[in-house]
Image: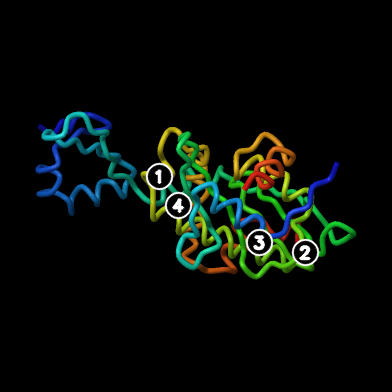
Amino acid sequence: MRKDDKAMPILAVSEAKNKLTSLRREALTGKEFILADAKRKDEQAVSLISTELLDELCESKTFSYQWLDEPGSETDNYSLWNRETGVYGVGMTKKEAIFDFIDNVMDYSQVFFADLPYYLSRSNPNRGHYWYLRRILRCNDNRDMLYRMLSLEDIDE
Amino acid sequence: MGYTFTWEQLERICRKLNMERQGKTSVWKGITPDGKMRTCIIHAKHKGNIGPGLISKIAKEQLLFDSVEELYNFYKSI
């Protein structure tokens, strides 16, 4: 079943199960294995691939911001908007708004990944947020790491 | 014409759009009978009015209305 000569081998799930340790070792070197379930032919394939390579791929997903409001006659707050995820932060100071944005984007990432069938539905307009939010999750709730990864120092005064 | 919304009014709109708060997070989501899937961020701690720039983004990008005016008319009909 396995075609070892192929650059991107396709394996049956049963075969992959038996060889998982060696497949993982090979995947670490950069090889991608596609797992197919013979019993469920209409389902999409699943890849076994290095996490580091996926992380590298996601690095191109960068975050950009827009200050929408500042305290004045219509509101008491600054509003910070992230263009890529449509998540915002609100606060009486810019710093407060930035920290509020971090809280909100962490919440959104948790909710998004807890209900992937909803968010990855073709009719969900937020489907494209996946790779950005994956970057958030990879920071493991470390706020300092998030602050740097989200490039928030560029807008923090 | 400028339209002003409070955070409480935004919560009311979300409820009417069949959206529910997700646990203790600031995220609300839900599907309306027309199949529109929405997600909105509302932080319970915020007070006062939502800024005009932000309500425009929330109306169009999170709640999928064409304009703040359309959002206002929807709120008035609740």
Measuring 56% from the left and 44% from the top, which residue is drawn there? A61
Kind of residue indicated by mark 1 = Tyr
Kind of residue indicated by mark 3 = Glu
**Residue that numbered label 3 is attached to:** B8
Q: Position of residue B35 (x, y in %)?
A: 45, 35
Kind of residue indicated by mark 4 = Phe
Left or right, residue A4 beside residue B10: left
Subunit that carries the residue with mark 1: A
Look at the numbered disc 2 and give the secondary structure of its residue.
Answer: helix
Tag 3 and tag 2, C-beta contact below 8 Å: no
Left or right, residue A45 beside residue A137: left
Tags 3 and 1 on a common chain: no
**Residue that numbered label 1 is attached to:** A118
Look at the numbered disc 3 and give the secondary structure of its residue.
Answer: helix
Q: Nearer the viewer, mark 3 or mark 4?
A: 3
Subunit that carries the residue with mark 3: B
Look at the numbered disc 4 and give the secondary structure of its residue.
Answer: helix
Classify 10 Å Cα crowding around label 2: few (below 14), some (14-19), many (20 and above).
many
Tags 3 and 2 on a common chain: no
Tags 3 and 4 on a common chain: no
Tags 4 and 1 on a common chain: yes
The CA span between labels 4 and 1 is 8 Å
Q: Nearer the viewer, mark 4 or mark 1?
A: 1
Q: Give residue A112's mark.
A: 4
Residue sitting nearer the eye, A60 or A69: A69
Left or right, residue A51 beside residue A61: left
Kind of residue indicated by mark 2 = Lys
Q: Give residue A94's mark.
A: 2
Residue sitting nearer the eye, A140 or B4: B4
Q: Give residue A11's mark.
A: none
The CA span between labels 1 and 2 is 33 Å
